[in-house]
Image (cartoon, rainbow, N blue to C red):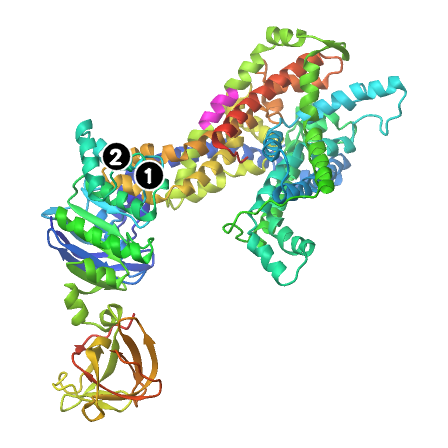
Amino acid sequence: MAASTTARGRPGRRSRSNWRDPWRLAGLIALLILLIFIVYPQAWIVRAAFTDDAGAFTLARFGAFVTDARFTEPLLHSVVVSLAVGAGAALVAVPLAFVMARYRIPGRQGVLTMLTMATTSPPFLGAYAWLLLLGSGGIVTRAAREAGLPLPFESILGVGGIIWVGVWFTFALIFLMVYDAFRAVDPALEEAAASVGSTPWRTHGKVTLPLAVPAIATGCYLAAMRIFADFGTPMLIGGGYSMLPVVVYQNFMSEVAASPGVAATASLMMVLVSGLALVAQRRIVARRSFAVTGGRDQPLRELRRGPKALVLIGIWTALLLGFVPHLVVVLTSFLRWQSGILQWEPTLENYRRLFEESLQPIVLSFVFAGIACLVALVLGVVVAYIVARKRFRISGPLLNNLVMVPYILPGTVFAIGFILAFNHLPVILTGTALIIVVAYFIRRLPYVMKSIETALGQVHPSLEEAAMSVGAPPRRSFRDIVVPIIRPAVISGGTVGFLQMITELSATVMLYAVPWVTMTVVIFTNAMQPGSPFGVASAMTTVLLVSVYVPLYLLRRRYKTVSL
Amino acid sequence: MDISIEGVSKTFGETTALESVDLSVPSGRLATLLGASGCGKTTLLRIIAGFETADTGAIRFGERDIAKVPVWKRRIGFVFQSYALWPHMTVAENVAYGLRLRKLPKEAVAEKVATGLAMVGLTGREQRRPGQLSGGQQQRVALARALALEPDVLLMDEPLSNLDAKLRVEMRREIRRIQQETGITAVYVTHDQDEALEISDLVAVMNGGRVEQIGAPENVYERPETTFVASFVGSVTLLRGQVTDDGDLALGSGGKVGFGRPLGPAGAAVHVALRPEDLRIVENGQAQFTGKVVRSSFQGGTRESVAELPGGELLAFEHRRPLATGATVGLVAERFTVVGEDTGVA
């Protein structure tokens, strides 16, 4: 504590007590790591975007970008699809969340658990599974064709498919946020409206809904950004509909493009868009941030039989559609495939082949995500503690802001930065396993750090002071008091981080090099090649799902709720 | 062990929290730092504890200069306003934590924990978690934890402000009893004058980062040295004026009041502090003050009314029989204090 008081006026003493504080050193190391792995790669992207092939400063690349339909069209597509997904998912989620928050619905806990599960589903899973069902050679399309039934569409490929998959992939995210907001509205506010003569529907429109707007905006933002940054979905089912992450990927990975400048320019445009989206979300939330906590719990009301049946049908239909991908993948993993065509024969053959031929990616996925998760936790604790407790005048604010940068970096952009920065001296990481580990840990650091910071907010500084007053030096009080109290948050933040790492595709697919192949890469490459062993890919996806949902289940059982 | 503080100053950025504070607490006594929020009392306590460092000045426990000794080596017990019990430990573990840090043998720890909890009347609650206790019980645990190590000094930062009124009275007597039984030197921070007057050996009234007066509770109450002290401790009427040639008080509004003895050198600007209980209703002829009753309130044992003097000054006085608003009343001051220093009113 002595260091945090930073008494002015006595420079000699101040600097001495400050430098003795071990958090100083930890903070500097953390800062160094963030500079190397966040600032340095992004600086390379900026440099590539602002220099011409000869190395001179130029703005021409941005001029070329905004006048070239090969880029403006995907940019527009990406924005439109993201908005459509955000709006669509909100249309599904908000009414359901409202009914669930206010009325007695049978199976509430089960529904909430399933929705939490849905939010951690691997990002490309939906695209892959819907492709299996409704792709041009998909199970349903083929069956319909054979039965002579007309389908309203040729296949799921295209913009409609992306939005469809996106909505079912993200609605649970919005649901959970909005559900909490509806639950948190103090009933007294609504009673006050009723007491001045407002009808229930008017009250909901004029009081309840506005109070939930920040949550809706945040949910929509998260949903839209998931799709905006998602590489797997448009790549798998985009068909001819080009979206920015795919264009950037193809541009950067194609052998023809000798200069990374084009991809770097497009990357900056992506960051610009996601940054603007963040600003918009912040403004909506800041302008309408009302304190709605406190007060009584919302009572759950009874619904009449008819509406109740409708609500139940709605909820379960949404859940079913959200979980179609999971069902399809698990089911097909136990069926035999022959040259890309599903045979309705149960078999364990897929799993036998999986464990014989592709055990390594499974192990690697666990190792990469596991190590990255541990590192993220350690660094997350350091940064969160410094941000929450220490009043370091320079490193504090720097850490706080830098650590959040990956939050707005799409995986594709992130990977390009890494490749540009780390394929030459002084730091060479490309082609190694380390680059994947580092990428995972840096990308998830903001989430891990925020969850720990929130938990630290609950640990009143006097708890540590009390320990010191009975003779515990700071290190000891940190170990005995702070760590045990924040442990649940560390564990749940770490678990969620691990889940997101193990399902990461958009950066991995650009960074990996043989033999460092992860589960997601195997599934993705399989899904991209017609006639490849879909059964094995399904089996691997099933393994991935198990490795995601078992920890999540254990976590939820132990800590009751999990915030993502 | 006695505590002595000499010339302690502290600034936070642009604001001055403490301005050259001196204070000494004799061994075994309980001193209260009394003042409104923001007066620097908590900062001073935290400097004594070692949670903050003073910019200048010396702090000694006994003969030992502790300015550079870190908190964990100061041998203090600290009771927090928020209790600061560790939620992940049981009551017994909370009390035992410091003892375990000292590497005391298991039996000794158990014994001291039992004694400590018995002292605060919590025997039988050892295995509870802090969250399962009431506010008063939590503060008892905090007290037992602070005393378990038999520290040199006990520091308490508004320990009762989160409790309800009745419990507050009960707990402050409890704290006083324990402090006297253990004979520990204690510093107690509060904004509640009743609390300060009841439990202290010594009251230090603080205002704007300075100590305005230090003394026994009776002294501070009966002989306030500044207008702030007079108005902060207890209820008071301050009459401002100038001493006339014959030693009376010339009120600003023009009236003149005699107090039976000269108030000071002629021409001096003084305040006369009058406590409501020092004023008595008399027949008109003998009255020092004559005024109109402007309000009157029933307070159980007594009534307190306010009379408006011809010059507009408001005078609060205590009496027993009901008075009608608007009635004329004559008053005599049986006791009064001349306050020399004008430091404003609370």
Which residues are drawn in magenta?
A368-375
Quadrant in the picture for the C terminus of chain B: bottom left
| Chain to which mark 2 belongs | B
Disc 2: which residue: B97
Disc number for residue B86 = 1
Asked whether A417 falls inside the magenta stretch, the response is: no
Q: Residues within 10 Å of mark 1 (few under 14, many from 20)?
A: many
At label 2, which amino acid type do we have?
A: Tyr
Q: Are marks 2 and 1 in contact (CB under 8 Å)?
A: yes
Q: Is residue B275 visible?
A: no
Residue drawn at (32%, 74%), measured in percent from left and top?
B298
Question: For the residue marked with disc 1, what is the amino acid?
Answer: Trp
- Helix, strand or loop at disc 2? helix
Residue closest to the eye, A533 or A264: A533
Prevailing SS of the magenta stretch: helix
Is A370 magenta? The answer is yes
Q: Is residue A399 left or right of residue A231?
A: left
Going by the picture, which residue comes out furthest to the bottom?
B285
